[in-house]
Amino acid sequence: MPTDDAPPTPESLRWKARPLVVFAVNRENPQLARQIAFLKGDLDALQERKIQVIRCMPHGPIYFGVNGDRAEITDPAIAEAWRSLAFDAGNWARFGVSLVGLDGGVKMRSAEAVTIERLSALIDAMPMRQNEMRREQD
């Protein structure tokens, strides 16, 4: 993980965490509120699957953590790196969620809030997660 004084970048989380990039055009977006409620509903599942939440908007700081309380990313280059994972270039929508795998590749994109159950099922079917679960059982 990044150090406390260094903001997380996509590269710094590679092979360490599965970023979940949550994008909304504004804080009042109802899908954003719904997504955050889903995530807060099972923080243990997020931790178990190494999910790190990155909340971003078109402009301004990016927030790291479900509550946006772990870090605020204001560096424009780092913020743009996170925004670029939210959607394909030029395809900005009002809301979206992108799951990034341990390898740094985008594994899922959704224009609607995603439940913990859906995220868990998707991650648990991934070969790397299957290996993690096997190691945990041993």
Image: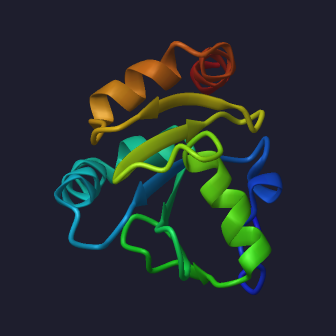
User: Left or right of 54: which side holds 138?
Assistant: right
Check the picture and name the quadrant holding the N terminus: bottom right
Which residue is depicted at the point 44% across and 56% down? 23
Return the residue found at the far front. Answer: 90
Q: How is the image coloured?
A: rainbow
Q: Estimate the x, y position of residue 95 in percent, counting from the top left.
A: 35, 51
Instruction: State whether residue 53 is above or below residue 87.
Output: below
User: Left or right of 113: which side holds 124?
Assistant: right
Q: What is the tally of numbered marks visible in this picture?
A: 0
69 vs 10, nearest the viewer: 10
Q: Estimate the x, y position of residue 24 in percent, counting from the top left.
A: 37, 60
Which residue is depicted at the point 55% across and 48% down? 86
Whether residue 18 can be seen here: no
Return the residue found at the far right. Answer: 11
Instruction: State whether residue 3 is above or below residue 39.
Output: below
Which residue is depicted at the point 78% across and 80% down? 6
User: Left or right of 4: which side holds 112?
Assistant: left
Instruction: State whether residue 23 is above or below residue 8.
Output: above
Whether residue 124 can be seen here: yes
Check the picture and name the quadrant holding the C terminus: top right
User: Left or right of 63: which side holds 136?
Assistant: right
Figure quadrant of residue 12: bottom right
Which residue is depicted at the point 21% across and 71% down? 28
